[in-house]
Amino acid sequence: MVDQTNNINGFIKRNYTDELISKASKIEILAFDVDGVLTDGGIYVDHDGKESKRFYAQDGHGIKIIQSINLKTVIISGRSSISVEHRGNELGVDHIIQGTRDKLSAFSEKFMECKNEALCYIGDDTVDIELLNFSGLSVIVPNSNKLLFEIGYDWVTPRSGGYGALRDVCDLIYYSKTIKNEKS
């Protein structure tokens, strides 16, 4: 039988720097954008004008993993969508904030006491810059607006938005907290 602990530790050492693990181990709130992060950025509109979105099952499972270690989850979207409300509620996301272009203010209103080191935010466009800059762990996806690659961030996920990017972040945080607890 293969020793899974050695496999996981090897994966962690190959994919995450010590600095990234340190930042991720302090996270208490995981907040993320929708279009381009939780989805591939596509907006599907049928002939009746009804909108739908495609969500990736592994991202949903990542949210459940994060919730299992008592992290708060927050959706922050510049648009408003019934699909997002439905998916967020289905996954038990703690807070769903939609229809805001000032994401930092909207987040701060709900979480006045949040220290930046306790927040991980995942974004993909210019509307996310202020909240990314505030976050203790700022994450972008490979399909982000090219300007975000110039502003500074802590990590780019291996997978694109809508194809496991959120799960990549959930795994990073989960494993970082596991490592921290094992060393304590």
Image: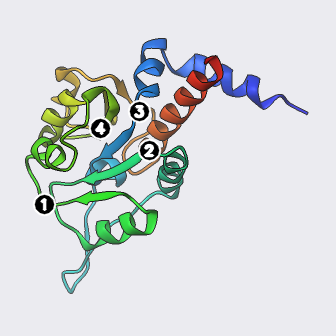
- Mark whose residue sits in front, 3 or 4: 4
Q: Gap between marks 4 and 1, in whole Å?
A: 17 Å
* Label at residue 121: 4
> Closer to the observer: label 2 or label 4?
2
For image coordinates 43% across by 27% down, the residue present is 24
Check if mark 2's residue and mark 3's residue have beta carbons within 8 Å: no
What amino acid type is highlighted by mark number 2? Answer: Leu
- The three-letter amino acid code for the residue at tag 3 is Thr
Residue under pointer 3: 157
Query: Residue at the location (29% across, 49% down)?
Result: 36
Q: Secondary structure at mark 4?
A: strand
Residue at 30 percent of width and 65 percent of height: 84
Which amino acid does the dot numbered 1 rest on? Gly
The residue identified by callout 1 is 99
3 or 4: tag closer to the N-terminus: 4
Residue at the extreme right of the image, as rendered: 1
Badge 1 local density, few (<14 within 10 Å), some, or many (20+)?
few
Which of the pair 103/42 is nearer the observer?
A: 103
Q: Name the quadrant of the N terminus.
A: top right
Label 2 environment density (alpha carbons within 10 Å; few <14, some 14–19, many ≥20): some
Dot placed on the residue nearer the N-terminal end, 1 or 2: 2
Taking the spot 60% from the left edge, 23% from the top edge, the residue there is 179
Q: Which residue is labeled 2 in the image?
A: 71
Distance of mark 3 from mark 1, alpha carbons?
25 Å
Q: Nearer the viewer, mark 3 or mark 1?
A: 1
Nearest the camera: 163 or 61? 61
Among the two numbered marks 3 and 1 on one chain, the one whose residue lies closer to the N terminus: 1
